[in-house]
Amino acid sequence: MDKREELINNHYNNYDEDNRLIKDNTHNIEFLVTQEYIKKYLKPGDRILEIGAGTGRYSLYYANKGYDVTAIEYVQHNLDILKSKIEENMNVVAEQGDAVDLSRFQDNTFDITLVFGPLYHLYNDDDIDKAISEAIRVTKKDGIIAIAYITSDGVFADWGIDHLLDGYPNDFDKDFKLIRYPEGIFAPFYISEFKNIMKKYDVTLLNNVATDGIANIISDKINNLSKKEFEVWVKYQLSICEREDLQGYSCHMLYIAKKN
Ligand SMILES: C[S@@+](CC[C@H](N)C(=O)[O-])C[C@H]1O[C@@H](n2cnc3c(N)ncnc32)[C@H](O)[C@@H]1O
């Protein structure tokens, strides 16, 4: 096992990924905002690829709505849970695989490609490039590529705050930027950095969305909102999620682009 394989398997074998997006309001907002944005681009009959499908929170949601879904997941433990939830009426193919090599698929195969997880864990530039290039390659011309990534300051405010005395210089640098390195499970970006990386590819940016905003930072308050109050907070997040002046502390971001 190489370092990345070992680290990712250790993490997800011991983490309840299946409940992550539904366990409380703080986590649920990422799912709700993401869904709202993907809805803008999905057309009846679309063929969806999800890379890093986890236990199928999105893949099965879309399969339930009648879409033809292909799910690729790196960790066998997560894939097994996903497969155990596929129902007879769903059109889902789920396979083990790595985002950096999608050679099993031909060019221009999918209408919409969701990369919801791999970029959280790729620390070297070559792998990041392969994952993005592969997602674009297998997407049809004029199709949609949606890539989730995590931010340096979102992770710093959530996790770094517990490591202010022991995190420097291995986990963050002198400017408090989180470092992407082989021993680190999470690989965050500055938003400007990720947008710059994406300029290399022949795609047009449609939306760069803060999917959870400051939910992690104020999680006690968010989790205590009533159902009706939370609905309003989600509306608020949807109304501000593309405002650059408010994005930096969002843990999760979603870069949505059209393939040229
Ligand atoms: C945080 S989970 C997200 C799961 C799901 N897509 C979601 O958004 O709820 C990230 C997932 O990406 C998977 N993953 C990480 N690196 C990957 C890679 N290189 N190729 C495919 N899947 C990967 C992990 O195993 C994990 O299941």
Image (cartoon, rainbow, N blue to C red):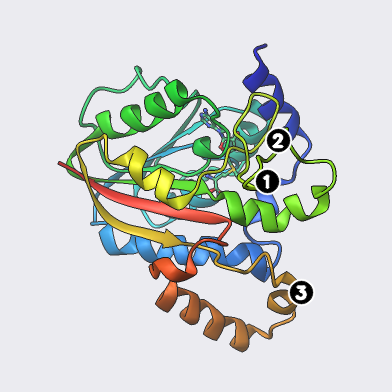
247, above or below 15, in the image: below
Residue ID for mark 1? 17
Residue 147 visible in the current orientation: no
Q: Quadrant of the N terminus?
A: top right
Within 10 Å of disc 1 (Cα), the crowding (few <14, some 14-19, many 20+) is some
Nearest to the observer: residue 121 or residue 69: 121
Contact (Cβ within 8 Å) of mark 1 with mark 2: yes
Nearest to the observer: residue 251 or residue 113: 251
Residue ID for mark 2? 12
Q: Quadrant of the C terminus?
A: top left
Ligand 1, seen in the image, is in the quarter at: top right
Q: Is residue 251 left or right of residue 168?
A: left
Residue ID for mark 3? 220
Image coordinates for residue 257, horizontal then vertical, percent: 27, 49
Q: Amino acid at mark 2?
A: Tyr
Q: Amino acid at mark 1?
A: Glu
Q: Secondary structure at mark 3?
A: helix
Image coordinates for residue 65, horizontal then vertical, percent: 39, 57
Q: Is mark 2 within 8 Å of ligand 1?
A: yes
Q: Is mark 1 within 8 Å of ligand 1?
A: yes
165, above or below 226, in the image: above
Label 3 to label 2: alpha-carbon separation:
25 Å
Residue at 27% in and 41% down: 199
Question: Could you tell which of marks 3 and 2 lies nearer the N-terminus?
Answer: 2
